[in-house]
Amino acid sequence: MTSHSAPPRRSPHSRRIIAISLASAVAVAVVTGGSFALQTANAAQDRAAATTALSDSTGRQHDQLAVYDSIATVHAKDAAAAALNRANAVLASAQNKVDATTLSDVASSLASYQVLPIDQVESLTQRAAAISTTVEAAAAEADRIAAEKAAAAAAAAEAQRLQALAASNTPAGAKAVAQSLASSKYGWSDGQFSCLVQLWQRESGWSYTAYNPSGATGIPQALPGSKMASAGSDWATNAATQVAWGLGYIAGSYGTPCAAWAHSESFGYY
């Protein structure tokens, strides 16, 4: 019978070396595992921070980020619609005032914002807004210039009216008005006009401010003076208005200036 030899027994020193090696391996494994776990946690924290930053920058919650592109598209189209409405309003107000061809072209392109790529929509929206501002300013300046011209024209017309009024309010001016109306409206001759000159010279000296104690007023000495309002509301300040009323009175009451003069010669009034 063959005898089995017993396995060699390790010395106490060898057992200590193995134990130390195993402990070192365990320590390395623990350290490596801990480092991996730390890296994983850090990565998760970074992803969370990035997500939070995106949410903060867009103003949307985490569960809305999936539809961010759709919302951005809606916002871009809303902005395009607003810019297009403003551009059309500016074009209407600028008509016949300034050249708005560029704005019209941009607005025509922007009108297709529903089907255009979003980046093109945003670009056209920005251009439409900028050009609208420029055209608005140019139209406002055109309005200002037009208003200045209109004011200047009105002032010139008023100055001309006042000059004509001042001229007609002199005795010579009033006679010129009377002679013209006597001929053009009534067909009276120069002889009739001569009678008129004598009549009103006696009555008022051809002064539109003449007034006597009985209340007779103006060149024709209307009594009361307010009668002349039928010829114009400016009867108290405009000799031409007084002349127009006086000629009508003579025509209606005496037929001609010479008949009125004859009555004045006989009775001292007409």
Image: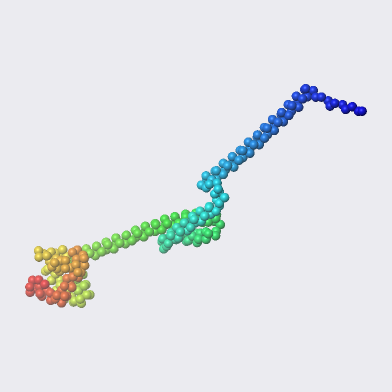
Q: Is residue 242 above or below residue 129?
A: below
The residue shown at (61%, 38%) is 42
Please provide percent x and percent y for residue 213.
9, 63
Q: Name the side, left or right, on which 108 lies relative to 93.
A: right
In the rendered view of the protein, which quadrant contains the C terminus?
Answer: bottom left
**62 sits to left or right of 156:** right
Q: Residue furthest left?
A: 267
Q: Residue at x 21, y 65 (%)?
A: 233
Q: Is residue 150 visible?
A: yes
> Can you see residue 204?
no
Which residue, as the protein is rendered here, is positioned at the far right? 1
Furthest toward the front, the residue is: 1
Q: In the picture provided, is 152 more to the left or to the right than 247?
A: right
Observer-nearest of 59 and 15: 15
Q: Position of residue 131 (x, y in %)?
A: 47, 56
The answer to which quarter of the image holds residue 256 is bottom left
Name the residue at 72% across, 31% down.
25
For this view, does 8 lie left or right of residue 57? right
Q: How has the structure been colored for display? A: rainbow
**Quadrant containing the N terminus in the rendered view:** top right
Residue 267 locus on image (x, y percent): 7, 73
Q: Position of residue 209 (x, y in %)?
A: 15, 63
Q: Residue at x 54, y 60 (%)?
A: 115
Which of 203/15 is in front?
15
- Which quarter of the figure has residue 49? top right
In this view, 195 is above or below 156: below
Looking at the image, residue 153 lies above or below residue 199: above
Name the residue furthest top. 12
How many numbered marks have been drawn onto this rendered protein structure?
0
